[in-house]
Image (spheres, helix red, strand yellow):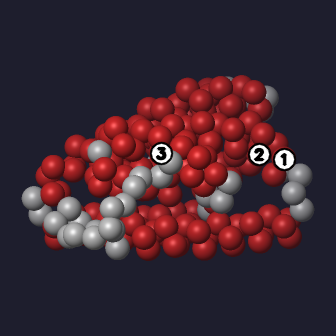
């Protein structure tokens, strides 16, 4: 079980679509408005692991391949949207962070999350209830680090729109790079 705890901690804290989007949300909107997004990742991934990981392990390979490609397209689109996010100095329409439901549903097309669930269920000698409880306990810290880091960078980046744009582009690129690992 210790091995799975280490696996869960590393997979949850490393860069990926959830963490990049949450950091961008922390930069753009701050901690409080981004809490539904944070909670959606926490509960959405836990639900994916509990139910979806079990179900997805029975999905035929052909169907899983198509789901994976759909996930790739969604990730690239969101990476693009993050990369072109308006900086604090640019005016435009009012943007909003992900809602709780949007973040929960995103877990089902997030290739890194789906791979984490399936590999976690098949590679370790644990019950899926044990795995779910471990992810439920490590996700708040691991994902929260990205939100808090984004919020801490918020005031600093507002003073330099070029640096803010660079961070958004790097977050978008990190999302695309995470696809290479999935």
**Is the residue under label 1 in contact with that under label 3 (CB below 8 Å)?**
no
Disc 3, SS? helix
Looking at the image, is mark 3 or mark 2 earlier in the sequence? 3
For this orientation, the residue located farthest to the front is 93
The residue under the point 55% across, 26% down is 137
Position of 70 compared to 64: left or right?
Answer: left
Q: Residues within 10 Å of mark 3 (few under 14, many from 20)?
A: many
Q: Is residue 179 above or below residue 102?
A: below
Q: Is residue 68 above or below residue 40?
A: below
**Residue on which disc 2 sits:** 52
**Residue on which disc 3 sits:** 37
In the picture, the disc for residue 141 is none
Q: Residues within 10 Å of mark 1 (few under 14, many from 20)?
A: few
User: Where's the N terminus, which quadrant?
Assistant: top right
Spatial CA distance of label 3 from label 1 is 25 Å
The residue under the point 32% across, 68% down is 93
Spatial CA distance of label 1 from label 2 is 5 Å
Disc 1, SS? helix
**Residue on which disc 1 sits:** 55
Position of 70 compared to 84: left or right?
Answer: right
Position of 167 compared to 182: left or right?
Answer: left
Residue 15 sits in which quadrant?
Answer: bottom left
x then y, percent, for residue 73: 60, 73
The residue under the point 34% across, 38% down is 32
x then y, percent, for residue 130: 71, 26
Residue 44 sits in which quadrant?
Answer: top right
User: Where's the C terminus, which quadrant?
Assistant: bottom right
- Asked whether residue 65 appears in the rendered view, the answer is yes
x then y, percent, for residue 174: 42, 64
Nearer to us of marks 3 and 2 is: 3
x then y, percent, for residue 144: 41, 37
């Amino acid at each position: 079980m210790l091995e799975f705890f280490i696996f869960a901690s590393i997979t949850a804290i490393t860069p990926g679509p959830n963490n990049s989007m949450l950091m961008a949300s922390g930069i753009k909107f701050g901690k409080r408005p981004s809490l539904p997004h944070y909670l959606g990742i926490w509960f959405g991934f836990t639900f994916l692991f509990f139910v979806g990981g079990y179900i997805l392990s029975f999905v035929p390979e052909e169907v899983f391949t198509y789901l994976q490609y759909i996930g790739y397209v969604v990730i690239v689109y969101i990476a693009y949207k993050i990369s072109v996010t308006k900086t604090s100095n640019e005016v435009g329409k009012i943007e909003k962070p992900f809602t709780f439901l949007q973040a929960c549903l995103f877990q089902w097309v997030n290739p890194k999350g789906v791979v984490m669930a399936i590999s976690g269920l098949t590679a370790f000698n644990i019950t899926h209830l044990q795995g779910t409880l471990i992810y439920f306990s490590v996700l708040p810290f691991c994902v929260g680090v990205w939100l808090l880091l984004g919020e801490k960078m918020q005031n600093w980046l507002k003073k330099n729109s070029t640096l803010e744009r660079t961070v958004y582009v790097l977050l978008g690129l990190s999302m695309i790079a995470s696809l290479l690992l999935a």
